[in-house]
């Protein structure tokens, strides 16, 4: 089968199979066998690239698997084979889910309890982009911050994979959504999603811009800060928060971990949530199951949409990782199996 194998730690933007690349693209990797009577083997149709995958190949992620390993987390595909005790699925069913590792391959094995049926009417490729990005935002906003109608949500890095999902989930919830992104193309895209206000961080003074919008709407401040960026933007955004605001720490795409002054958090009664979505699989599995089922329902009903910015074949993984690194993506970047097509942004 086709598979993308991380053979050493290094820069994933280097072309696979070159001497300096950490990644090797194989067309003859062994197809995994069913691991238990309740196992299901899935022929992968598409798999999503997340910033965590980019960090993991470089050895910079908190979880460091032994070498060699097949990277990859969320994916969608068609059931290929099932174990004798599998009752929920059969060959030919459309499914999606996430894994700790292994989705950058043509086949992957999962337990039937970990799989989610892709509803009729949902695009199978798009479903590959749902679990991690949309799951992260949904657990963060719905379960941790408990975002409510008419609250003000500020999303940093709003044109990235998790950012786009946070904007949409905020709108479904009925919140007033302020989105921060870089560049005209991203600003226009976020407006098309229904963001109530979009600030271009490459041109505007974020604090002054957002304060002017809040004043125009007679709003006192931001109730929930969704932060996958960190750095100076994160620090500055604290000036916009209401008393009793909630801060969702999603990641540090800027490469800089922000410091939230504890004395100010105390005086303003802020709540700070760290959100490591993957660990819910161990500690709160029912939360993940309920969350993903609700998101798939929303997707089938058109309440949320998934923008695929770029798709690549696995042999072009370096280009996919470059799109993440250089922040060229608006929405999600995918690897697809079976058609060998490369598609740039749909915008």
Image (cartoon, grey):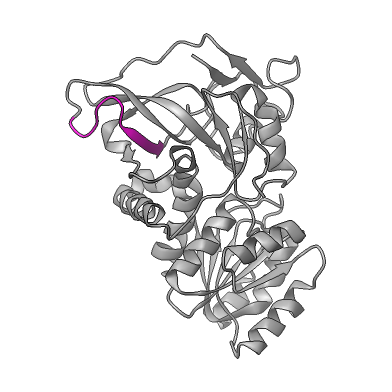
Q: Is residue 264 visible?
A: yes
Which residue is drawn at the image coordinates 47% and 80% (left, top)?
A: 150
- Secondary structure mostly seen in magenta is loop
Residue at the far right: name it: 203
Which span of residues is magenta-colored? 87-97
Q: Is residue 70 above or below residue 49?
A: above
Q: How many numbered discs? A: 0
- Image location (x, y in percent) of residue 174: 45, 74
Horizontal side of 305 relative to 257 (left or right) equals left
Front residue of 327 and 279:
327
Q: Is residue 12 visible?
A: no
Horizontal side of 67 relative to 303 (left or right) equals right
Which picture quadrant has residue 157? bottom right
Which residue is drawn at the image coordinates 49% and 67% (left, top)?
A: 170
Asked if the stretch drawn in magenta spans residue 144, the answer is no
- Image location (x, y in percent) of residue 332: 58, 45
Horizontal side of 172 relative to 216 (left or right) equals left
Q: Is residue 65 above or below residue 269?
A: above
């Amino acid at each position: 089968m086709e598979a993308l194998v991380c053979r050493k730690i290094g820069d994933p933007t280097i072309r696979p199979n070159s001497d300096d690349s950490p990644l090797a693209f194989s067309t003859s990797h062994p197809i995994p066998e069913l691991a238990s009577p309740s196992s299901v083997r899935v022929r992968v149709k598409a798999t999503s690239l997340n910033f965590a995958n980019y960090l993991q190949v470089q050895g910079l992620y908190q979880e460091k698997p032994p070498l060699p390993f097949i990277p990859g987390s969320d994916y969608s595909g068609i059931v290929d084979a099932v174990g004798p005790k599998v009752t929920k699925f059969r060959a030919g069913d459309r499914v999606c889910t996430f894994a700790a590792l292994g989705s950058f391959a043509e086949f992957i094995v999962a337990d039937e309890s970990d799989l989610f049926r892709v509803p009729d009417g949902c695009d199978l490729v798009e479903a590959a982009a749902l679990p991690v990005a949309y799951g992260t935002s949904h657990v963060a906003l719905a379960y941790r911050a408990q975002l409510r109608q008419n609250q003000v949500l500020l999303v940093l890095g709003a044109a990235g994979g998790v950012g786009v999902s946070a904007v949409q989930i905020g709108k479904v919830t009925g919140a007033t959504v302020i989105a921060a992104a870089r560049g005209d193309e991203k600003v226009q895209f976020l407006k098309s999603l229904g963001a109530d206000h979009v600030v271009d961080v490459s041109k505007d003074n974020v604090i002054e811009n957002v304060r002017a919008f809040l004043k125009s709407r007679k709003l006192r401040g931001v109730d929930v800060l969704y932060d996958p960026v960190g750095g100076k933007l994160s620090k500055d955004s604290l000036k916009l928060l209401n008393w009793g605001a909630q801060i969702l720490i999603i990641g540090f795409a800027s490469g800089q971990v922000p410091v939230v002054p504890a004395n100010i958090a105390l005086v303003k009664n802020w709540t700070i949530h760290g959100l490591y979505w993957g660990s819910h699989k161990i500690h709160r599995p029912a939360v993940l199951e309920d969350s993903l089922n609700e998101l798939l329902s929303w997707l089938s009903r058109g309440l949320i949409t998934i923008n695929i910015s770029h798709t690549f074949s696995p042999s072009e993984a370096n280009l996919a990782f470059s799109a993440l690194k250089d922040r060229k993506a608006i929405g999600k970047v995918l690897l697809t199996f079976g058609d060998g097509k490369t598609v740039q942004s749909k915008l």
